[in-house]
Amino acid sequence: MDQPPVNVSTLRRMKGDKEPIACITAYDASFALLVDRAGSDLVLVGDSLGMVVQGHDTTVPVTVDHMIYHSRLVARGLSRAFLVVDMPFMSYTSPDQALDNAVRLMQEGGAMMVKLEGGAGQVAIVEHLTRHDIPVCAHLGLKPQSVHKLGGFKVQGREAEQARKMADDALALQNAGADIVLLECVPNEVGQSVTESLHVPVIGIGAGPGVDGQILVLYDLLGITQGRMPRFVRNFMVDADSVPEAISLYVNAVKDRSYPASEHCFS
Ligand code: KIV
């Protein structure tokens, strides 16, 4: 029997029940269908599409129009998974600009939630979106849109002070109304302590096993992405005979907590 569509309450219930949340990125309808059929609970149209689809070195060149285009494609392939769409670089510099762009992502792109990068500095934006009933995912840790400021794609929160600030930011964003927190590239201990301190689900990518769910970039888990892979990536094609099988292996590995293993973690 068809399973009911996932929504924010489903994700909160899963956190409460300690049921791992499996998430994958997708950028078109065919892959969205496969990811949905494999049982991914959440699908993200990530601005990583700037790198893995468009061939840029960073996500900075991605625009709201690009996100809407890909989100429309993905929305057509989904029947159960919850659709989250990234707000690209400089599309949320003020509360009003963020609201205008979030509305476009929802109305034109079919997004059910928008994701934005940033810490306590984004509290006013998250409050404004929340006041208008727009679900928000707050992305902390390694923020790829800030790569030129960070000086590269590096693990974040290794120092105690930085880790404490990240935890404070996560709490502030939850209190501002964020429905999900996403943590990228942080030590296991930071992933676990932020997860324990929040009542909203925490999804990790390179954040260790102690978070409520895992996400990977689809092309990374299929071994398509060229160049040096981050430590947290596992190529699931190595153990699969087909793309659908590799995606199912990933979902199952998240569900039975065999991914991430210690070799995919930072401590
Ligand atoms: O853009 C993206 O795909 C993301 C993931 C890395 C979480 O933000």
Image (cartoon, rainbow, N blue to C red):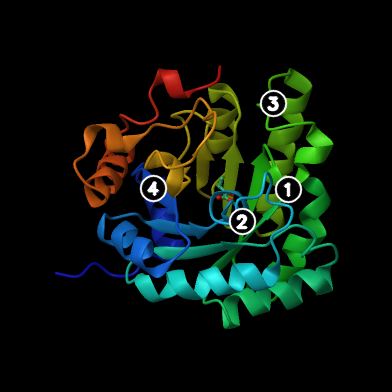
Regarding residue 81, the answer to whether it shows in the image is yes
Mark before the other along the chain sequence, 3 or 2: 2
- Residue under circle 3? 157
Mark before the other along the chain sequence, 1 or 3: 1
Mark before the other along the chain sequence, 4 or 3: 4
Q: Is residue 175 above or below residue 82?
A: above
Q: Secondary structure at mark 1?
A: helix
- Residue under circle 2? 47
Q: Position of residue 167 (x, y in %)?
A: 69, 35
Q: Report the residue at 50% width, 44% height from top.
A: 203
Q: Residues within 10 Å of mark 1 (few under 14, many from 20)?
A: many
- Name the kind of residue labelled 3 in the image: Gly
Q: Are marks 1 and 3 in contact (CB under 8 Å)?
A: no
Q: Are marks 2 and 1 in contact (CB under 8 Å)?
A: yes
- Residue under circle 4? 21
Q: Position of residue 212 (x, y in %)?
A: 45, 41
- Name the kind of residue labelled 4 in the image: Ile
Task: Confirm or reject: label 2 Cβ below 8 Å from ligand 1.
Answer: yes
Regarding residue 133, the answer to whether it shows in the image is no
Q: Position of residue 191 (x, y in %)?
A: 56, 31
The image quadrant that residue 125 belongs to is bottom right
Q: Is residue 116 above or below residue 220?
A: below
- Residue under circle 1? 145
In this rendering, would 137 be left or right of 248? Answer: right
For the residues labelled 2 and 1, the Cα–Cα distance comes to 9 Å
Task: Confirm or reject: label 3 Cβ below 8 Å from ligand 1.
Answer: no
Mark before the other along the chain sequence, 4 or 2: 4
Q: Secondary structure at mark 2?
A: loop
Q: Which mark is residue 27?
A: none
In this rendering, would 251 be left or right of 24? Answer: left
